[in-house]
Image (spheres, rainbow, N blue to C red):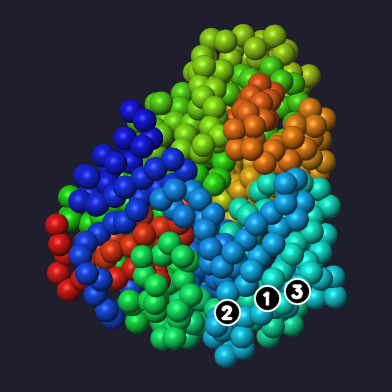
């Protein structure tokens, strides 16, 4: 069954109305009809945001409500559309981008949005500010400078970057007021200090527990494609951090929470049977879920070992036994609903006999305890992964069992935030479970020097990256991305696992939509007094 068919089947089973298209996803969920005004939505996320400059899902989910962006990716089509920039264009070689800034926009502190403020935002994010201890955002590949002329901002890049619209549509490029930009990193990281032009305004917070946002009554500049062209329908949003997935599901079940992200597969059927919405939200702008392989690590430096690890994972069984129909086994490093996706499933098909043969050939022999050994050391690997995925730990428990049959011991640190933060920066850690933006270019993501996925430069990928980021014709870009996907899989730089999806649950009276980065769109969300069918 295709990912789109599974998504639709899951939504129908949960009583959800939905529509989707290539590169996009569910158009709407919950009751239909005339939006109703007022009320508070309580939203449960998997973690409390302690750093408003971080790249976590949880940060984007909060940031989107209070900070707007220059352009917006239409969830239904994947097209870049106007937001704070009413017009935008680029030159033929994608080295110069021009944004005409919308008139009449103000920040929540009453100051106006101007082209100069936009330039200040882009410069700080794109170049960093050492005096404020703010590093440059790595996704701003090639950023050189911005110049202002009237209400127009022109961005100059040192090299072509066809992904730049994607970058400025992301939450880290959200436009903030001068009062926020004046702060150092520590100050900007505090959500109470973030002043934006968004549909909601910070009201209060309880550390490690919740953030409360209130509607901005004069909001009048949503994305051009938003179904709500005025202030939010809701009065307030309360964003609660509930780390335990079973407790999140229970909170939806009991009505303590209206919407929750990170629903584990074992809770989906029960919530649907109780009349709750179960909403699988895909993320076509990210890679699929992968275990990136740090090829500088001695134990996985041999491509035969990496190929054995790849062939030693039964992805279909993983989905069937650990995940649910909300998920689809990956067939590439990109998700099936990415327009650039290439099906490489035949290269990674489960083949434990071939995996065992490759390990034998690489000199790893089965020891007396069943674990392979070479030069007196066991084949023992560790994996770390972020807590942002509710299924990551049980998935690696399944993989651990399969690899054990091959004579590989896996230490499963998935879901341990401390271990993950250490592993991100430590090239000796062999495997990193992740899914990530590829705004820097898929080739650079895996191939540039000091990248945190493989920790190794790859000349072939670096060569392809120039073609990828300079290909202004979509078909040519997809052709290059096809070569990149093949390189990553052929070299087994990433063990591909399943397509990225964030499963949510919601009360039947909540109408809500999501971006194709899975962020909830509360500006257009509403609650009905009685759920409609």
Residue wearing tag 3 = 149
Q: Quadrant of the C terminus?
A: bottom left
Q: How far apart, in angstroms, are the residues tagged by discs 2 and 3?
A: 14 Å
Is 148 or 329 nearer to us in this picture? 148
**Marks 1 & 2, CB-CB < 8 Å contact:** yes
Residue 151 circle label: 1
Please tell me whether mark 3 sits on a helix, a strand or a loop: strand
Please tell me whether mark 1 sits on a helix, a strand or a loop: loop
Task: Establish if 156 lies above or below 432.
Answer: below
Based on the displayed image, in which of its 4 quarters is residue 328 positioned?
A: top left
The residue lying at 46 percent from left, 38 percent from top is: 337
For label 2, count other residues whose C-alpha is less than 10 Å away and answer few (under 14), some (14-19) or many (20+): some
Residue wearing tag 2 = 103
Task: Where is residue 26? Give x, y as percent.
Answer: 35, 50
Is 368 or 467 nearer to us in this picture? 467
Is 416 or 340 nearer to us in this picture? 340
């Amino acid at each position: 069954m295709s990912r789109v068919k599974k998504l639709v089947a899951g939504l129908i089973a949960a009583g959800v109305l939905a529509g989707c298209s290539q590169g996009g996803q569910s158009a709407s969920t919950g009751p239909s009809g005339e939006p109703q005004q007022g009320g508070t939505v309580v939203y449960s996320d998997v973690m409390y945001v302690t750093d408003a400059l971080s790249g976590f899902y949880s940060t984007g989910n909060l940031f989107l409500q209070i900070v707007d962006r220059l352009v917006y990716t239409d969830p239904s089509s994947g097209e870049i559309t106007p937001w704070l920039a009413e017009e935008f264009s680029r030159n033929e070689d994608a080295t110069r981008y021009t944004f005409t800034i919308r008139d009449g926009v103000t920040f929540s502190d009453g100051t106006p949005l101007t082209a100069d403020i936009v330039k200040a935002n882009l410069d700080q994010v794109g170049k960093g500010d050492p005096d404020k201890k703010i590093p440059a955002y790595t996704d701003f590949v090639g950023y050189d400078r911005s110049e202002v002329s009237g209400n127009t901002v022109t961005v100059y890049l040192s090299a072509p970057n066809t992904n730049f619209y994607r970058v400025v549509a992301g939450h880290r490029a959200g436009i903030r007021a001068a009062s926020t930009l004046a702060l150092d990193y520590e100050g900007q990281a505090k959500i109470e200090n973030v002043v934006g032009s968004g549909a909601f305004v910070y009201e209060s917070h309880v550390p490690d527990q919740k953030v409360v946002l209130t509607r901005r009554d004069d909001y009048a500049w949503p994305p051009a494609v938003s179904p709500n062209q005025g202030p939010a329908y809701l009065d307030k949003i309360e964003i609660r951090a509930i780390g335990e997935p079973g407790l999140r599901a229970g909170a939806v079940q009991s009505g303590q929470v209206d919407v929750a992200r990170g629903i584990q597969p074992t809770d989906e059927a029960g919530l649907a049977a109780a009349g709750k919405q179960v909403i699988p939200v895909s993320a076509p702008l990210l890679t699929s879920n992968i275990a990136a392989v740090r090829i500088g690590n001695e134990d996985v430096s041999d491509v035969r070992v990496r190929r054995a690890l790849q062939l030693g994972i039964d992805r279909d069984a993983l989905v069937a036994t650990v995940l649910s129909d909300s998920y689809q086994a990956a067939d590439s490093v990109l998700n099936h609903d990415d327009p650039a996706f290439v099906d490489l499933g035949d290269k990674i098909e489960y083949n434990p006999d071939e995996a065992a043969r490759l390990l034998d050939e690489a000199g790893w022999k089965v020891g007396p305890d069943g674990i392979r050994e070479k030069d007196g050391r066991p084949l023992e690997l560790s994996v770390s992964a972020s807590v942002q995925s509710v299924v990551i730990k049980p998935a690696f428990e399944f993989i651990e069992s399969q690899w054990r049959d091959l004579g590989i011991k896996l230490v499963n640190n998935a879901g341990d935030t401390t271990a993950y933060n250490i592993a991100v920066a430590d090239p000796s850690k062999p495997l990193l479970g992740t899914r990530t933006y590829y705004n820097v270019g898929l080739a650079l993501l895996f191939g540039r020097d000091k990248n945190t996925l493989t920790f190794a430069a790859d000349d072939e990928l670096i060569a392809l990256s120039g073609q990828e980021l300079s290909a202004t014709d979509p078909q040519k870009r997809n052709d290059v991305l096809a070569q990149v996907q093949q390189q990553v899989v052929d070299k087994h730089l990433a063990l591909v696992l399943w397509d990225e999806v964030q499963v949510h649950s919601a009360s039947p009276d909540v109408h809500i939509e999501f971006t194709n980065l899975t962020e909830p769109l509360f500006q257009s969300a509403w609650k009905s007094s009685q759920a409609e069918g």
